């Protein structure tokens, strides 16, 4: 669970994978909000009284420094209207659309283009 912080600054820690050493995340797809049990694209999510829809790029990856070199975390755009009021308690899924695999020395050995937004993703809850 993460609290929303300042815009364009990672509010998550460096993203890791259980299968391999994850390097920089070059791009992400449009985030999903899991509300009522089913994922909805954030730009299509429309809870009652939301003053302005979320942009498709509201959640995105940004560079963060870690002990292992440059990694990526998740940031957000500047919230518009009352958007931030609706994020608390929501489960968010951010698809990874382009990312790197590193070897034990931190060198890039593979570049991947994500194809399954529900398997190649980062998920978290907003506090």
Image (spheres, rainbow, N blue to C red):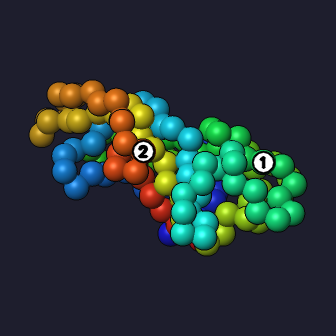
> x and y percent of residue 81 in the render?
86, 53
> x and y percent of residue 107 in the render?
19, 29
- Asked whether, in this view, residue 42 is left or right of residue 94, the answer is right
Q: Residue furthest left?
A: 104
- Asked whether, in this view, residue 96 is left or right of residue 33, the answer is left
Tag 1, which secondary structure? Answer: loop
How far apart marks 1 and 2 lie (CA) works out to 21 Å
**Which mark sits nearer the N-terminus, 1 or 2?**
1
- Report crowding for label 2: few under 14, some 14 to 19, many 20 or more residues within 10 A (C-alpha): some
Q: Is residue 34 above or below residue 63?
A: below
Residue at image coords 49%, 54%: 93
Q: Is residue 87 above or below residue 25?
A: below
- Residue marked by disc 1: 53
Residue at image coords 21%, 28%: 110
State which quarter of the image contains the C terminus. Answer: bottom right
> x and y percent of residue 70 in the render?
35, 37
- Residue marked by disc 2: 117
The label shown at residue 93 is none
Examine the image and state in which quarter residue 114 appears. top left
- Asked whether, in this view, residue 98 is left or right of residue 3, the answer is left
Q: Is residue 39 above or below residue 103?
A: below
Residue at image coords 38%, 31%: 98
**Can residue 64 be seen here?**
no
């Amino acid at each position: 669970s993460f609290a929303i912080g300042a815009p364009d600054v990672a509010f998550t820690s460096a993203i890791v994978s259980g299968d391999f050493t994850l390097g920089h995340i070059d791009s992400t797809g449009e985030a999903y909000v899991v509300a009522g049990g089913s994922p909805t694209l954030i730009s299509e999510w429309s809870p009652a009284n939301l003053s302005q829809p979320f942009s498709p790029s509201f959640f995105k990856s940004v560079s963060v420094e870690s002990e292992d070199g440059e990694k990526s975390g998740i940031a957000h755009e500047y919230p518009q209207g009352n958007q931030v009021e609706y994020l608390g308690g929501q489960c968010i899924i951010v698809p990874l659309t382009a990312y790197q695999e590193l070897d034990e020395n931190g060198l890039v050995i593979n570049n991947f283009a994500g194809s399954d937004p529900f398997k190649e993703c980062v998920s978290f809850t907003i506090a």
